[in-house]
Image (cartoon, rainbow, N blue to C red):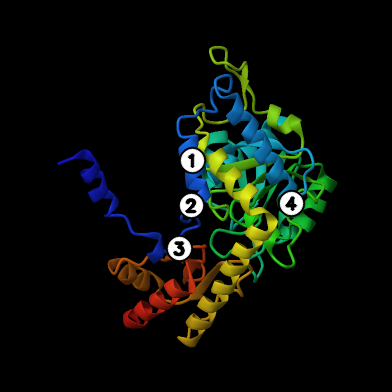
Amino acid sequence: MDVIEELKRYREMDIPYSRVLSSMCTTPHEIAVKAHELFINTNLGDPGIFPGTVELEKKLIEIIGDILHCKTPFGYICSGGTEANIQGIRSARNVKARKEPNIVIPMTAHFSFEKICDILRVEVRRARVDENYKVDVSEVEKLVDENTVAIVGIAGTTELGQIDPIVELSKLAEEKDIPMHVDAAFGGLVIPFMDNPYPFDFINKAVTSITIDPHKMGMATIPAGGLVFREERFLRALEVETPYLTSKMQFTLTGTRPGTGVASAYAVLKSLGYRGMKRIVDECLRNTRVLLEEMSSLGFEPVIEPVMNVVAFKTESAEEIKAELYRRRWVISTIRNPKAIRFVVMPHVTEEVIKNFIAELKRVI
């Protein structure tokens, strides 16, 4: 068998995005694919060989910084939200330099913080959330002490798309002189394009770092995560010597870094601009309302009213529904508390996809 035909056979085993209503990734934008191909053999881990790609990354960080209300952003494009969260906390730990460091996160934080606890040997303290699944600021305050090196807020929780009270958390962090890290891996390229965007970003004085993933709502090719700092010293706190490369120092977690994520993300954000991105976000939010109406007509109640293009519906049969739909090659996800089925309405989840899904769901239930 020809190797390409063999590869096609394996690829055909994958479930197409048109039947996936759970992923925070999507089909890359057409221009992202073209940019990816143009930069397919670049390696940002050796910047002396690829100075043009390095310059492009700086321009992309400036664009993202502008979206996040930061005039002088410092950062880089990485593998995804997990790496960005690790590096954001690693930087805060190195800057604060405590012997027994801890961080305070919401109970709804991404599972990457489990890895952070293990890798960085930082104690992770989890604050309770309120009835709307936002972190309770008073609980965060109780957990903070002299060894706290970072307070974390989420702008677009993975399970429900909820936004923590970043403004209040930032005031607490400022008062306690503690760096604040915002995980906006998903919401970072949704919230700024909503009609009444919540001020989750560097407009808050204590926010020192933000995770933001262009390969999610930015429609870049995978991998294209992002980490942005307000001050250069937080980026420099990550540096190690790299004597055998074309650069003397390196602040990234991985050594080899493809330039494809940079090029594809830049191409999308540059070509679409604010208006283009807003049109896409508006359409996702409209389709989220369509899904909400369809599910409500079947008797499903949302866990919370959707804040962005993520919505979950309560059901004791969540796992059974998920399993049966997967057997029919439809992919949704579930959450455990409360038991619910969860949806992410990405650009590929069109109204037609929703109608087709609802027809299948009716047969399942």
Q: Which residue is mark 4?
A: 201
Q: Secondary structure at mark 2?
A: loop
User: Reading the chain from its start, which is encountered first: label 4 or label 2?
Assistant: 2
Query: Disc 4 versus disc 2: distance between alpha carbons?
Result: 25 Å
In the foreground, 300 or 202: 202
Q: Residue at x 32, y 68 (%)?
A: 323
Q: Can you tell which mark lies on residue 279?
A: none
Q: Earlier in the sequence, mark 3 or mark 2?
A: 3
Q: Of the residues shown, which amino acid type is indicated by label 4? A: Asp
Horizontal side, residue 256 vs residue 250: left or right: left
Residue 299 spot, x, y in % from top left: 47, 86
Q: In front of the other: label 3 or label 2? A: 2
Location of the C terminus by quadrant is bottom left
What amino acid type should be assigned to the residue bearing mark 1? His
Which residue in the structure is indicated by mark 3?
A: 22
Residue flagged by tag 2: what amino acid is it? Pro
**Which residue does the numbered mark 2 point to in the structure image?**
28
Mark 4 neighbour class, 10 Å CA radius: few under 14, some 14 to 19, many 20 or more: many
- Residue at image mark 1: 36
Between 167 and 307, the one lying in front of the other is 307
Question: Where is 351 relative to 83, above or below?
Answer: below
134 above or below 223? below
